Amino acid sequence: MDLTSAPKGCASSISSIYYNLCDLTTVWGVVVEAVAAAGVVTSFVLFIILMASLPFVTDKKRKGMVALQAGILVCTLGLFGLSFAFIVGQYSTSCAARRFLFGVLFSGCLACLAMHGLWLALLERRGRGPRSWMLCLGALGLWLVEVIINTEWLIITVVRSPLSGVVVPDLSCSIDKKDFVMSLIYVMVLLVAVWC
């Protein structure tokens, strides 16, 4: 694509890294953007409905689970919003956001789901589940493990110098796929835990 002229649908004042968001000749970016925007709006509306229905919930057990449900919706909203960082062109900020937030937001969703599933299982077996603050602390603990893993991984992979001695202008965008997958192993473990 000729980078000197903006593609159809994009204004000439827009930077070339945002061409995938508005280029009408390659529609995939516009379609993904529309689905992501619909996901963001849906998650936000569900969050508002959840918060608005809180005064009408009389059962304390169900009221205690609202924090976990809100956590799921906030992380889902973040995942839909993060898809915009995958559509735009690669530059240091979008690459760092992709690498760090992908695992963090997924682990947030899965940690809340795991604790909510634990509550439901204990509620069925014993007739009562653990206190809601204990479940929220459990979800926070599970989530913080991935935050620490991704923080360390981001620091190690961005700060380390290339072994070949060649200076890479934007190291945050030049990451191997196997390194990215290695940072998401804990998310896969959480996914299996939620599935079982």
Image (cartoon, rainbow, N blue to C red):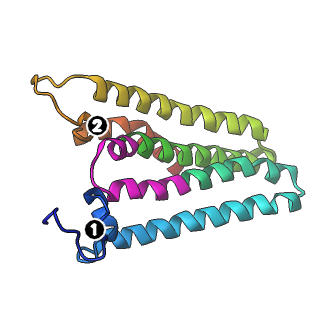
Question: Within the magenta stretch, is there residue 88?
Answer: yes
> Can you identify the residue that label 2 sits on?
172
At label 1, which amino acid type do we have?
Answer: Ser
Image height of 97 relative to 10, above or below: above
Q: Main secondary structure of the magenta part?
A: helix
State if disc 2 and disc 1 touch (CB < 8 Å): no
Q: Residues within 10 Å of mark 2 (few under 14, many from 20)?
A: many
Image height of 16 relative to 5, above or below: above
Rendered residue at 33%/70% (across/down): 22
Please state which of residues 38 and 66 is positioned toward the viewer in this rendering.
38
At label 2, which amino acid type do we have?
Answer: Ser
Residue 133 on image: x %, y %:
76, 37
Rendered residue at 49%/33% (across/down): 147
Label 2 residue SS: helix
Residue reaching furthest right? 58
Please state which of residues 166 and 182 is positioned toward the viewer in this rendering.
166
Q: First in sequence: mark 1 or mark 2?
A: 1
Left-right relation of 145 to 114: left
Residue 75 on image: x %, y %:
55, 50
Badge number at residue 156: none
> Can you identify the residue that label 1 sits on?
12
Question: Within the magenta stretch, is there residue 125?
Answer: no
Left-right relation of 107 to 52: left
Residue 176 on image: x %, y %:
22, 39
Please state which of residues 191 and 180 is positioned toward the viewer in this rendering.
180
Label 1 residue SS: loop
Span highlighted in magenta in the image? 77-98
Residue 55 on image: x %, y %:
87, 58
